[in-house]
Image: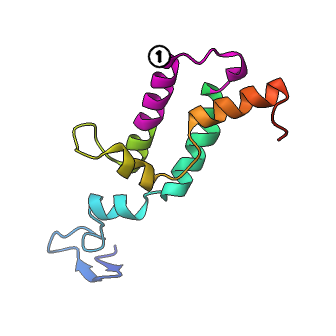
């Protein structure tokens, strides 16, 4: 029967009731900081998984003021979620756009509409 465990923090004795690896456990906040993906990784996942689905057949959309407003609101919601900014925090959209530097959805819709009509060659 083994009565001692070896840990990276030292030795823990079986008789004193300590569990093995008790000294080497990470707190949940430390673990969360270690495993946080970078902002660029999150943005690329957003672009490939969400935006590609949302922009399906966007060439045929009629861009009304209401449609433009909804597209921009959806994009801001995604950007806030990725950067960890809650809706109740007082962060201006300009500050949000400075943190997230990527082409927005509305520009992509317009680019695709122009490309379909032959006005843009890309």
The colour scheme used here is rainbow
Instruction: Spot the residue most to the left.
Output: 16
Q: Main secondary structure of the magenta part?
A: helix
Q: Is residue 50 visible?
A: no
Q: Secondary structure at mark 1?
A: helix
Q: Is residue 100 above or below residue 54?
A: below
Q: Which residue is mark 1?
A: 66
Q: Is residue 10 visible?
A: yes
Instruction: Spot the residue most to the front.
Output: 119
| Neighbours of disc 1 within 10 Å: few (<14), some (14-19), many (20+) | few
Indicate left or right for 46 with 99 as reference: right
Name the image quarter holding residue 119.
top right
Residue 62 is a magenta residue: yes
Residue 63 is a magenta residue: yes
Question: Which residues lie in the magenta part?
Answer: 55-77
Residue shown at 34%/48% (left/top)?
A: 84
Indicate left or right for 11 with 44 as reference: left
Q: Indicate the position of residue 53 as horizontal and vertical percent values.
A: 63, 27
Q: Is residue 5 above or below residue 92?
A: below
Q: Quadrant where the N terminus lies? A: bottom left
Residue shown at 30%/67% (left/top)?
A: 25
Residue shown at 14%/74% (left/top)?
A: 16
Indicate left or right for 91 with 81 as reference: left
* Towards the viewer: 77 or 65: 65
Q: Indicate the position of residue 31 as horizontal and vertical percent values.
A: 35, 62
Residue shown at 56%/41% (left/top)?
A: 46
């Amino acid at each position: 029967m083994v009565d001692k465990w070896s840990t990276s923090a030292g030795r823990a004795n079986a008789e004193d009731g300590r569990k093995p690896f008790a000294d080497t456990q990470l707190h949940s906040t430390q673990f969360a900081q270690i495993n946080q993906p970078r902002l660029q990784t999150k943005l690329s996942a957003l672009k490939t998984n969400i935006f590609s689905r949302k922009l399906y057949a966007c060439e045929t959309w009629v861009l009304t003021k209401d449609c433009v407003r909804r597209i921009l609101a959806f994009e801001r919601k995604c950007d806030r979620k990725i950067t960890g900014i809650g809706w109740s925090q007082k962060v201006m959209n300009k500050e949000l756009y400075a943190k997230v530097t990527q082409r927005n959805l509305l520009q992509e819709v317009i680019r695709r509409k122009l490309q379909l009509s032959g006005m843009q060659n890309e």
